[in-house]
Amino acid sequence: MNQFLQNNSFLIIIFLLLIIFILMGGMIFILYKLLTQSKKELPPLAEVITPTKLLSEKFPLIPLPVVERYTCIHHKDAPSVGSCLICEEVFCADCLVDHESMHFCKEHFRTYANFKWKQITDTRTTPDHPEEGVYIHNFKRDIWINKNIPSFVMTHYKINIENDYIESFIQLNVRLEDVDKLIVELEKYKALT
Ligand SMILES: [Zn+2]
Ligand SMILES: [Zn+2]
């Protein structure tokens, strides 16, 4: 046996080296596989985007209701929780009525409940043309402040999956009795702005 080892020591060393190379190659291959797999399993690095952040980024020109007052206009000590869709004043939880995800002050909830309403716009705005709907918000404020005509704007958001952006539809709701008159006035208002 010793004789055999002595005579073939060179061949044996080569043979052992070969086995070591094969084992190392295998280990490197397994390591490589493990590393590339664990990379794939990692979730994509995505920025956490809140709905409001998304909306304000996509529609920088749309005036969001600015809450300048932080307390209810009726109760100086009560923090405001939201604004009325019709008068746009801010109110505390006791003064604000939540109706089908619309908010009104008590007075204007009665206005809402006492009339029939009709939606007269469904103006689509996109991130490329966010200004499309601004005149509607301005018109709504104008007829309320200057003519005391109540109306309210609802915004319907839709995600355009194909083009990866958010479309919004600006829906102005007016009393049934004002529909004809306000459609004409809104057109004039749009032409002026
Ligand atoms: Zn109100
Ligand atoms: Zn209040």
Image (tube, helix red, strand yellow):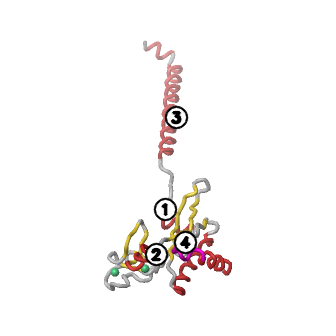
State ligand 1's quadrant: bottom left
The kind of secondary structure element at disc 2 is loop
Frontmost of labels 3 and 4 is 4
Dividing the picture into quarters, in which one does residue 123 lie? Answer: bottom right
Of the two numbered discs 1 and 3 on the same chain, state the one appearing first in sequence.
3
Q: Are marks 4 and 1 in contact (CB under 8 Å)?
A: no
Using the image, tell me which numbered label, if any, was put on residue 29. 3
Q: Is the residue 40 above or below the residue 3 in the image?
A: below
Residue 115 position in % (x across, y down):
46, 74
From the viewer's perspective, tell me whether residue 120 is left or right of residue 50.
right
The kind of secondary structure element at disc 4 is strand
Frontmost of labels 1 and 3 is 1
State the residue position of label 4: 172
From the viewer's perspective, tell me whether residue 93 is left or right of residue 25.
left
Instruction: Say which amino acid is labelled 2.
Output: Leu
Quarter occupied by the C terminus: bottom right
State the residue position of label 1: 49
Using the image, tell me which numbered label, if any, was put on residue 85. 2
